Amino acid sequence: MVAIKACIFDLDGVIVDTARHHFAAWKSLADELVISFTEEDNERLKGVSRVDSLDYILQKGNLVLDSAKKLQLMEKKNMLYLEMAASTAPTDVLPGVVSLMDEMTASGIKIGLGSSSKNAQSILDKLHLTSRFSTIVDGNNITLSKPDPEVFLKAAAAMDVAPENCLVIEDAQSGVEAAITGGFYAIGVGKGLESAHAQLENLEGLTIERISNLLQ
Ligand code: B16
Ligand code: MG
């Protein structure tokens, strides 16, 4: 029997579908730079930091830019993203998230956030979810982005729970890899996340009992 004492949620793509805004913003920037940017590229960038995402796109286009220009492009991408995410509201929380959090809190399972995004706090505020978290670790608190496990290790340490007693819920290949490397249980949401302990299409109807069965 797996003893889960804490659950670390990824943000973009797990709690809310802001992943589509990240894609649209990077796509618009890549179009401007005349670099092709596909859904497949986007899959690889999920969970990856802003700077690493830009480096990936520039490398794809064989484009070398100085750090001032790169900073300018990252600011532009973030402005686009923030414009698109501005209307994010509690009704955008993905199905199944709130009921799972309610059940976990009632059962004494701590809830943490492990996101690469520097915008995580403002998105959680827009969703009215901030008070549900025992700890929030995001792109502002880490030096290495997923697939490095730093973000999850910091969240687990803040909740005083060992990785082997902690579940990570992720939609990104980089995030699942980070969780597995860090010694966590991982549930992947979406496709192509075979290295997770279990894969689900979405969180609708997910309960603690079902999680226990999935992780057996
Ligand atoms: P920002 P997550 C990640 O969030 C996104 O999946 C990824 O697309 C984005 O590049 C990264 O955050 C950085 O976001 O530019 O807002 O700092 O999935 O780890 O919650
Ligand atoms: Mg994600």
Image (cartoon, helix red, strand yellow):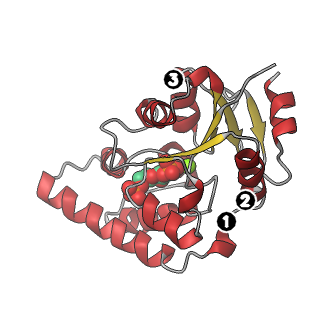
- Distance Cα–Cα, label 2 vs label 3: 26 Å
Cα separation between marks 1 and 2: 8 Å
Q: Earlier in the sequence, mark 1 or mark 3?
A: 1
Label 3 sits on residue: 182
> For this rendering, which residue is in front, 21 or 216?
216
Looking at the rendered image, the disc whose residue lies closer to the viewer, 1 or 2, is 2
Amino acid type shown at disc 3: Gly
Query: How far across and how far down the image is residue 30, in percent?
Result: 38, 62
Q: Is mark 3 within 8 Å of ligand 1?
A: no
Q: Residue at x 59, y 33 (%)?
A: 176
Question: 64 or 92, which lies in front?
Answer: 92
Q: Secondary structure at mark 2?
A: helix
Examine the rendered structure and indicate whether residue 212 appears above or below residue 106. Answer: above
Q: Which circle marks residue 93 in the picture?
A: 1
Please give the residue where the numbered disc 2 appears in the rendered image: 98
- Residue 102 in the figure: left or right of residue 47: right
Q: Residue at x 76, y 42 (%)?
A: 107
**Whether residue 24 can be seen here:** no
Q: Earlier in the sequence, mark 2 or mark 3?
A: 2
The quadrant the C terminus occupies is top right
Q: Nearer the viewer, residue 142 or 17?
A: 142
Residue 85 visible in the snapshot: yes
10 Å crowding of disc 2: few (<14), some (14-19), many (20+): some
Three-letter amino acid code at the position of disc 1: Val
Q: Are marks 1 and 3 in contact (CB under 8 Å)?
A: no
- Residue 112 left/right relative to 72: right
